[in-house]
Amino acid sequence: MEKRKFGKTNLEVMPLGIGAAFHGITDFSQEDCDKLLNIVLDEGVNFVDTAACYGDSEEKIGKAISSRRGDYILLTKCGHKANDLNADEWSTNIVTESLERSLKLLKTDYVDILLLHSCPMEILENDDIIDAVCKCRDSGKTHFIGYSGDNKPALKAIGMNIFDVLETSVNIFDQRAIDDYLPQAKQTGLGVVAKRPLANTCWRDLNGYSESYAQYGEPYAKRLKEMNFTPQTLGFDGDWLELALRFTAWQEGVSVCITGSKNPDHIRQNIKVLQKGPLDEETVGKIRQLWTQNDNGSWEGQI
């Protein structure tokens, strides 16, 4: 896979990254995490996404691959309360304390990207919070800053001309960003991380998945039912995973898609899918039309 420019930053990313939430909020051993993350890097994936509130995800990443720090771009998020942070949620102190904690757990002197983690609009309008994040960048402990979230707060973040990165939901069943703010993000030079590109694999039976995974998958499953199609009815010669991942990865403005897995074979499969390149224009057009025909204005991105 060829690397892409990551917005106005000096970073170059593969179109596929690893989302490491699963590693901290599910039963996943350090040994298995070591194996998976090293395989991911060996395969050429160079983007790792985590957050302070993802259980022990940061600690596992630090133990697994901190010795290979030059091989990957590291993104973490702050603002929510983590287990051993004393500061109040969405305070200036939690921004700085969270980053210090992250650096310690990740075993590194800096993260490439620090994001405010899906905060509400009033936080983005709080000058003290924004100043605290900017000071983290000024200190060199993070090289770039940004916002993770959807809908009106995402649009607000883009227009602030402060951030370098936007992480937001983009997939077949979550196309709001494509219509409302990806063009602006590209125009302002933001690097865009597409989360949930596989729509939590909502085409599967979500029973048996973790509660949090099913929580996000259920609304997508309802939208699938409304849109009422399959890859085959589109005339697409491939499965749901391929259709979904190739759809998202080549939306205008998207820099990298993050997918989470505890199985190295899944990562290898995703790499092979993306090596096929973008979907044909006719297939993309059909998917976009189905969204437009069925969205009643309430299908917002999932925070």
Image: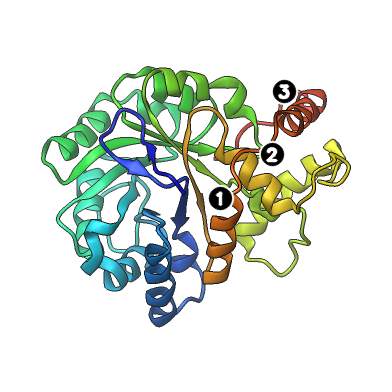
Which residue is situated farthest in the left direction here?
139
Q: Nearer the viewer, residue 88 or 24?
A: 24
Label 2 – label 1 distance at C-alpha? 19 Å
Q: Residue shown at 44%/23% (left/top)?
A: 186
**Upstream in sequence: badge 2 or badge 3:** 2
Residue 77 seen in render: yes
Vertical placement of residue 3 versus 60, above or below: above
Reading the image, the residue beneath label 3 is 297
Q: Helix, strand, or loop for circle 3?
A: loop
Label 2 – label 3 distance at C-alpha? 16 Å
Q: Helix, strand, or loop for circle 1?
A: loop
Question: What sort of colour scheme is used for the picture?
Answer: rainbow
In x, y percent, where is residue 269? 59, 62
Q: Kindly indicate the quadrant of the structure image that contains residue 222.
A: top right
The dot on residue 172 is 2
The dot on residue 275 is 1
Vertical placement of residue 141 versus 162, above or below: below
Vertical placement of residue 177 versus 79, above or below: above
Q: Nearer the viewer, residue 276 or 250?
A: 276
The residue type indicated by label 1 comes to Gln
Whether label 2 touches label 1, CB < 8 Å: no
The residue type indicated by label 2 comes to Ile
The residue type indicated by label 3 comes to Gly
Residue 302 seen in render: no
In x, y percent, where is residue 44? 40, 58
Residue neighbourhood size for the residue with mark 2, other residues' Cα within 10 Å, grouped as few (<14), some (14–19), many (≥20): many
Q: In which quarter of the image is the C terminus?
A: top right
Residue neighbourhood size for the residue with mark 3, other residues' Cα within 10 Å, grouped as few (<14), some (14–19), many (≥20): few
